[in-house]
Image (spheres, rainbow, N blue to C red):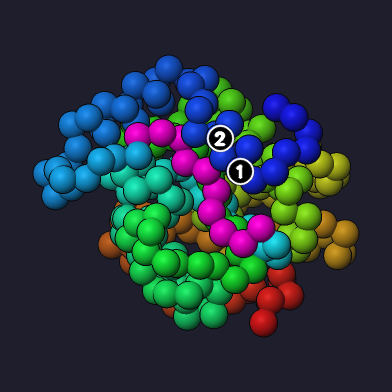
Amino acid sequence: MAAMIDFPELEKQITACRLCPRLVAHREEVARTRRRAFRDWEYWGKPVPGFGDPAARLLVVGLAPAAHGANRTGRMFTGDRSGDWLYRALFKAGLASQAASTDRQDGLTLKGVFITAACRCAPPDNQPSTQELESCRGFLDAEFRLLAKVKAVLALGRIAFDGALALLERHGLPIPRPRPQFAHGLRLDWAGKWPVVVASYHPSQQNTQTGRLTEAMLDAAVAEAKAAAGLK
């Protein structure tokens, strides 16, 4: 992958990727069979590029596209309940133009925020392998290079958190030892030399329906990341 490309070229590279046979087979099978509620949709069925403000100061990193969410709509956190929670929190924080994200043409815009994921294809059981995550990391690197104004990272879940630390480490951050471990509400501040990392539980149904993550908790994490990014 070229060191310096623009977002349109990067999006082409991401959507054309077929590096992981298991993920390719799964995303395309889901797109063929569809869920009954979405039988009239033409599923995206490809890797999903990041979405948001190219001048973003806040980078939000999730796990992967949902099988019937972003794998259907083609936009990160769009068309599923995790996205309902995330975009509602961003809207309340003044970082999204609307509280809901239903499809790529719904008019949603983000202010100072770019949303991406550690894995670009919907994985079976929401569990990408270590090798699959490794295959995707070049896309995250390319986005980070293009997002030159990023001052904070909001990591949604452990895999996103580990991916965010690995991203910063690849770009020169000396990660302390022992390596920081994921915990909801954790903030890592590198004396202003690197983007602040804020950790939150992922707004998955497993977390939101059990009360492990509440709206107040997610709102607080978004507010913390917004402040760290210097957004108003």
- Relative to the observer, which residue lies in front, 26 or 146? 146
Q: Which mark is residue 12?
A: 2
Query: Residue at the location (81% across, 41% down)?
Result: 171
Furthest-left residue in this view:
36
Image side of residue 77 versus residue 95, left or right:
left
**Residue 219 in view of the camera:** no
Quadrant including the C terminus:
bottom right
Cβ atoms under marks 1 and 2 closer than 8 Å: yes
Crowding near the residue tagged with mark 1, few <14, some 14–19, many ≥20 C-alpha atoms within 10 Å: few
Q: Which residues are magenta?
A: 45-54
Query: Residue at the location (38% across, 59% down)?
Result: 105
- Relative to the observer, which residue lies in front, 155 or 48? 48
Report which quarter residue 124 is drawn in.
Answer: top left
Measured as percent of width and height from the top left, residue 222 is found at 56, 71
Circle 2 — which element?
A: helix
Circle 1 — which element?
A: helix
Quadrant including the N terminus:
top right
Q: Is residue 148 above or below residue 167?
A: below
Crowding near the residue tagged with mark 2, few <14, some 14–19, many ≥20 C-alpha atoms within 10 Å: few
Give the overall secondary structure of the magenta segment: loop
Measured as percent of width and height from the top left, residue 221 is found at 56, 70
Measured as percent of width and height from the top left, residue 128 is found at 46, 31
Measured as percent of width and height from the top left, residue 62 is found at 51, 50
Report which quarter residue 7 is drawn in.
Answer: top right
Query: Residue at the location (55% across, 74% down)?
Result: 95
Is residue 224 one of those drawn in magenta?
no
Which amino acid type is marked by label 1?
Answer: Pro
Q: Which mark is residue 8?
A: 1
Q: Is residue 13 above or below residue 169?
A: above
